Image: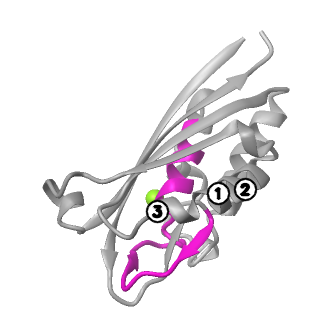
Amino acid sequence: MIHVGIGYDVHALVEGRKLVLGCVEIPHERGLDGHSDADALAHAITDAVLGAIGEVDIGHFFPNTDPRWKGAPSRVFLEESARQVKARGGRIVNIDATLIAERPKIFPHIGLMKERVAAALGLPVNKVGIKATTNERMGFLGREEGIAAMAVASVDLPE
Ligand code: MG
């Protein structure tokens, strides 16, 4: 039985932080603020996978008050979501995600992002879609105050 899940995340862009998206460090003058590495794309995908199996969101498993996850690579969160699917006898069918960032240019990094996200989820790379768009300079995303990501996951679960 195919189940789908949706995920959304946004983090603020601030000085003095690395920019990590889709488990890839991207050269930029600012990075995303957060307790972990603040990888909004990985967080949205994690929530999509957790949503597809009817689970609670990422913040429940990895509270931002827990020092263990301070600066944690978000690969760990993706791995945990895949582990939960497996524990239910299921498998992730595919993932699709969109990043919304005015800058920097995301496209040159998408190949590596797909490889790393696929590896964290235990999927072939052709099961992971990642696209990027701008917000046409409108709103907080358009003013480069932050970067957002949305994702869907399809998961095959036993009846
Ligand atoms: Mg987040």
Q: Point out the frontmost of discs 1 and 2.
A: 1
Please indicate, yes or no, whether residue 54 appears anywhere in the rendered image. Answer: no
Q: Looking at the picture, which amino acid does disc 2 mark? A: Glu
Residue at label 3? 106
Q: Are marks 1 and 3 in contact (CB under 8 Å)?
A: no
**Distance of label 1 from label 3 (alpha carbons):** 10 Å
* Dot 3 alpha-carbon crowd within 10 angstroms: few under 14, some 14 to 19, many 20 or more: some
* Dot 2 alpha-carbon crowd within 10 angstroms: few under 14, some 14 to 19, many 20 or more: some
Q: Is residue 10 above or below residue 130?
A: below
Residue pictured at 80% horizontal, 42% vertical: 124
Where in the figure is residue 132, as x and y percent of width and height? Answer: 43, 51
Q: Quadrant of residue 42?
A: bottom right
Region rendered in magenta = 23-48
Residue at label 1? 111
**Distance of label 1 from label 2 (alpha carbons):** 6 Å
Where in the figure is residue 76, as x and y percent of width and height? Answer: 70, 61
First in residue order: circle 2 vs circle 3: 3
Please indicate, yes or no, whether residue 118 appears anywhere in the rendered image. Answer: yes
Location of the C terminus by quadrant is top right
First in residue order: circle 1 vs circle 3: 3
Residue at label 2? 115
